């Protein structure tokens, strides 16, 4: 057996020949493998002749001097080994720590993948590789299964954690750092749901990438491929049309279209939707764009206005007088759980959401399409069966008052203003401007809103009909073509890394966690946020009574997300290093993809541009609403300037949509 005459220092810095720990002046490091050697124990033939040569000195192992030591041979001998190590040393993109890691791996017989520069944590091709390296159990060294996070910031599988815990009281310690674990957590560990969700999403992405290059297939039926009638599956026929799919949309109006549906939007019949047309149910009514929601009584947007309403007898406060009616807003009823309907009022209504949309239409004077249903049994003007289109109305006033059931409700005064006669009238002509009816409940009403200034939809004496005095609102949903006829817009798909970073959000600041800590109740917070939530509170408080000092009492500090006391945990907050490393890796990966992404405009980019155009329109709308607010007075500009500004706004919005290249399915 060969005797090794020359040996380097071991991992503790002790020479393997003389068993002495040499000083830094007596140590000599190899320029190739960075292994320390004891200068005195080297043969004279291996020592550098001068101090200048010590910088580029190569140890006997790397220079393949006959010492009897085994040398790692990679692809053809020592020359290839030296060439590979020299290439690692000359790579300026690598840090010294990374160079040492690669030299060690290469000399031990491993291989370095070509082109894998940078941090080893970022060499994965998918998110699961990053998670697999970051979130591993400290016991079984596998990807976490039902992860449990200890107060000291270490992650274990639930099964491994239970096996490692002792059965004696006060004897349970973390197997990684030997810190004491509270008895309650040792006996009843909680699963970290944030880590579970992140691992599940990463696995789903890997399955989708393995199965298809485009991920999961989303099935969608184009409007032109839908049947002429709303349909149900064989399994859902027993429940009627509660589970029905919408049939073909016959008109080309966008979903946020205001006013009557004229012939230009009707490629099927070239006549539009006429007053008095009726359908069997709300599903058929939707197909002609008159009132799109299947169940809701109001169609609109809170910052844009309401397009249509349906009178179906949902509220006892409604009063229907044909040419005018009092309408009750939505909300104020408990629909929690699986409740679809509820006739009992349980809270007060406010001017928000759909109620605010109706108030916007009141302030702007927009026409609102009205549909009456046979379910309105108290009205003399309701149809005997199905639903019927009764023309457009204008909201003249809105207010709040105490309803029949004792809660505040939003109320609206609708007055008919259509160019076609009402279905119940024998007149040949449409409506004429009429005085507002006297509403008695206005005496006790609050939050009364009346329109100040000229309405957008008004009667023209010269033409003897109702017309748009101002340009109608610019659609934010896009105009539909007769061929496609689809009203859906393709949403922007977020990447898995963005969704993972969203899952790692702090439950206090709602942002991606910075220095994350996990409480014993398995909730995740930023360390600064958790400390700030209990700033100024001490762990104990002093007590005294009648000059006597009593025993101090422990302050109870409840978790911001639940009622568990975490006072002991707050005394020594430990950052979850593995979770923090994972978040940093995902953020770096996302930044690299953003830098390497091509500047070509995609569907997501088009959606962003479209959203910017919508935001600009919202700002214009809010400015107009402020100018019409009764508290600030009426408009100071004349009608011509209003028309010019509205036309200019419409042209700008149209130009932005064309530049954005909005894509509709």
Image (cartoon, grey):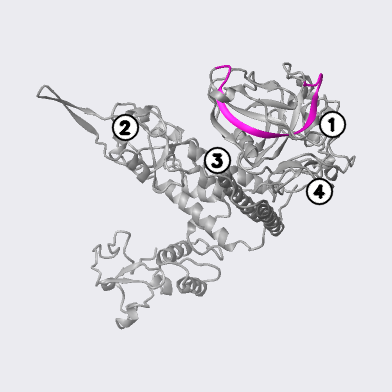
| Cα–Cα gap, marks 2 and 4 | 60 Å
**Which label's residue is closer to the chain start, 2 or 4?**
4
Q: Which residues are magenta?
A: 381-405
Residue 275, located in which quarter of the rendered image? top right
Q: Position of residue 389 (x, y in %)?
A: 79, 30
| Residue underneath mark 2 | 557
Q: Quadrant of the N terminus?
A: bottom left
Give the secondary structure at mark 4: loop
Task: Name the foreground residue: 115 vs 273.
Answer: 273
| Cα–Cα gap, marks 1 and 4 | 20 Å
Q: Position of residue 653 (x, y in %)?
A: 68, 55
| Residue underneath mark 1 | 229
Give the secondary structure at mark 3: loop
| Residue underneath mark 3 | 630
Q: Position of residue 579 (x, y in %)?
A: 44, 46
Task: Name the foreground residue: 237 vs 213.
Answer: 237
**CB contact under 8 Å: marks 2 and 4:** no
Task: Characterize the local packing of mark 3: few (<14), some (14-19) or many (20 or more) Cα atoms within 10 angstroms.
Answer: some
Q: Is residue 348 above or below residue 226?
A: above
**Which label's residue is closer to the chain start, 3 or 1?**
1
**Which label's residue is closer to the chain start, 1 or 4?**
1
Residue 416, located in which quarter of the rendered image? top right
| Cα–Cα gap, marks 2 and 3 | 49 Å
Q: Which mark is residue 481?
A: 4
């Amino acid at each position: 057996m060969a005797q090794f005459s020359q040996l380097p220092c071991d991992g503790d810095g002790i020479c393997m020949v003389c068993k002495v720990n040499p000083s830094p002046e007596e140590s000599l490091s190899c320029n190739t493998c960075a292994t320390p050697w004891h200068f005195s124990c080297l043969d004279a033939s291996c020592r550098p002749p001068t101090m200048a040569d010590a910088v580029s000195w190569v140890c006997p192992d790397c220079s393949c001097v006959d010492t009897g030591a085994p040398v790692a041979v990679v692809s053809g001998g020592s020359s290839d080994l030296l060439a590979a190590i020299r290439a690692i040393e000359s790579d300026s993109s690598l840090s010294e720590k990374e160079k040492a890691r690669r030299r060690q791996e290469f000399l031990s017989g491993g291989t370095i993948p070509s082109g894998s520069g940078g941090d080893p944590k970022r060499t994965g091709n998918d998110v699961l590789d990053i998670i697999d390296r970051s979130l591993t159990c400290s016991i079984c060294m596998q990807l976490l299964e039902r992860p449990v996070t200890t107060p000291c910031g270490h992650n274990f599988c639930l099964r491994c954690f239970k096996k490692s815990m002792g059965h004696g009281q006060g004897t349970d310690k973390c197997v990684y750092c030997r810190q004491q674990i509270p008895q309650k957590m040792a006996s009843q560990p909680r699963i970290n749901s944030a880590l579970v969700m992140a691992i599940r999403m990463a696995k789903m992405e890997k399955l989708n990438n393995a199965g298809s290059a485009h991920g999961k297939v989303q099935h969608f039926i184009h409007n032109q491929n839908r049947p002429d009638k709303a349909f149900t599956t064989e399994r859902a026929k027993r429940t009627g049309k509660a589970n029905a799919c919408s049939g073909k949309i016959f008109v080309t109006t966008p979903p946020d279209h205001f006013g009557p549906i004229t012939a230009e939007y009707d490629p099927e019949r070239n006549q539009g939707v006429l007053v008095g047309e009726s359908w069997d149910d709300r599903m058929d009514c939707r197909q002609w764009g008159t009132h799109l929601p299947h169940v809701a009584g109001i169609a609109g947007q809170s910052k844009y206005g309401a397009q249509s309403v349906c009178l179906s007898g949902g509220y006892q406060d409604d009063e229907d007088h044909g040419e005018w009616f009092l309408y009750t807003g939505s909300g104020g009823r408990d629909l929690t759980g699986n409740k679809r309907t509820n006739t009992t009022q349980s809270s007060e209504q406010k001017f928000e959401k759909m109620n605010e949309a109706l108030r916007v239409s009141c302030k702007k004077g927009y026409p609102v399409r009205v549909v009456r249903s046979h379910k309105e049994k108290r009205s003399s003007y309701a149809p005997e069966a199905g639903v019927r289109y009764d023309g457009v109305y204008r909201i003249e006033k809105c207010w709040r008052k105490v309803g029949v059931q004792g809660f505040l409700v939003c109320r609206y005064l609708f007055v008919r203003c259509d160019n076609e006669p009402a279905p119940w009238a024998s007149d040949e002509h449409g409506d004429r401007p009429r005085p507002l009816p006297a509403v008695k409940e206005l005496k006790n009403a609050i939050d009364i809103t009346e329109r100040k200034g000229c309405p957008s939809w008004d009667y023209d004496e010269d033409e003897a009909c109702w017309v748009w005095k101002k340009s109608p609102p610019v659609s934010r949903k896009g105009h539909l073509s007769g061929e496609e006829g689809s009203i859906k817009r393709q949403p922007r798909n977020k990447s898995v890394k963005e969704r993972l970073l969203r899952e790692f959000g702090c439950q206090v600041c709602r942002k991606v966690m910075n220095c994350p800590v996990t409480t014993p109740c398995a909730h995740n917070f930023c360390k600064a946020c958790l400390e700030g939530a209990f700033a100024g509170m001490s762990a104990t408080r002093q007590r005294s009574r009648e000059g006597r000092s009593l025993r101090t009492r422990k302050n109870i500090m409840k978790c911001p997300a639940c009622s568990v006391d975490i006072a002991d945990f707050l005394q020594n907050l430990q950052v979850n290093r593995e979770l923090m490393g994972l978040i940093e890796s995902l953020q770096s990966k996302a930044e690299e993809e953003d830098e390497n992404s091509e500047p070509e405009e995609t569907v997501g980019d088009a959606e962003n541009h479209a959203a910017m155009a919508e935001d600009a329109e919202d700002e214009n709308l809010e400015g107009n609403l402020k100018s019409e607010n009764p508290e600030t007075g009426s408009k100071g500009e004349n009608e011509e300037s209003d028309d010019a500004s509205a036309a200019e706004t419409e042209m700008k919005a149209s130009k932005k949509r064309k530049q954005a290249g909005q894509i509709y399915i």
